[in-house]
Amino acid sequence: MRAELKIEAMKWREQGIILNLAVIQVGDDAASLVYVRSKQNLCQQVGINLDLFIFKGTVKTEEILTLLSELNNDHKVHGIVIELPLPPQVDKQRVIASISPVKDVDGLHPLNKGYLLSGKEGLFPATPAACIEILKRSNIEIAGRHAVLVGRGETVGRPLIFMLLKENATVTVCHTRTVDLSFYTRQAEILFVAVGRPKLIKGEMVKPGAVVVDAGINALEKGICGDVDFEAVEETAGAITSVPGGVGSLTTVLLLKNVCRAIQMQQEEREREGTF
């Protein structure tokens, strides 16, 4: 997929366009810094430019909105990412809603959420898209199968529900109020887990031969692990993603694929408006 992305970026370069991603970092949250470095490394590998804008943790909402207005109106910027979390004094919803929907490569703008809900084309979050892509690249059928999703979070679980429905899966959603979680997970032909609880899913909770997709990432003293107890579940599952090295390894690639999709959408929008 990195090779495909590099070819796509090169095609735009041949047209005189250098794909450009703007990343806004607020404060010094350790996890956000890791994600920014990951984006920088991949952009360098595939030939996409990344502009990093750093604000102090004391920044006010209006300062971020001023920058977003400039980036929205800059035709040389094709994608915008706000690294989350934002400090409490910043109005997260105002900030997200102020990103141009056709530059919102994280798929967080209310309009893109609506497109996902209605089954229309838009820019959608990279992590749930990676959950789908990793199955497709592995030639694992989704249509008609019973998919059980553990987790209903805003960035992974909820978007994944509608992505799975679009793929014609039969979807069951479990969450913190679900009684007898194991009863549902043992029914899954494809089990997705995205809750942020280390090694929550044990071997006895998985149907023999099931496909297990772990979208969790947890930092422990011994290193990074997922929401699935990999060693225990690996013996039962028919296929399983690892953490690290599974869904997370695709997420940044799919974010940059969204940059390619975004510039196409921006060109189409300008053509409709007669401003291209």
Image: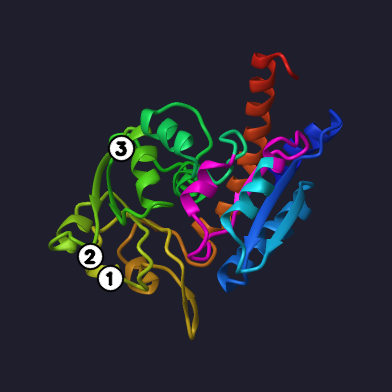
Q: Describe residue 15's horizontal placement relative to residue 113 as left or right.
A: right
Q: Name the residue under label 2.
A: 205
Q: Mark 3 points at which residue?
A: 169
> What residue is at 28 percent from the left and 40 percent from the top?
145
Q: Give the range drawn in magenta.
A: 70-99
Q: Describe residue 152's horizontal placement relative to residue 22 as left or right.
A: left
Amino acid beneath label 1: Lys
Q: Where is residue 28 in the image (x, y as percent from the top left)?
A: 62, 72
Q: Where 47 sits versus 264, above or below?
A: below
Q: Position of residue 93 (x, y in %)?
A: 47, 49
Please state which of residues 78 and 96 is positioned toward the viewer in this rendering: 96
Q: Residues under labels 1 and 3: Cα distance?
A: 24 Å
Local SS, label 3: loop
> What residue is at 30 percent from the left and 70 percent from the top?
200
Residue 53 seen: yes
Q: Residues within 10 Å of mark 3 (few under 14, many from 20)?
A: many
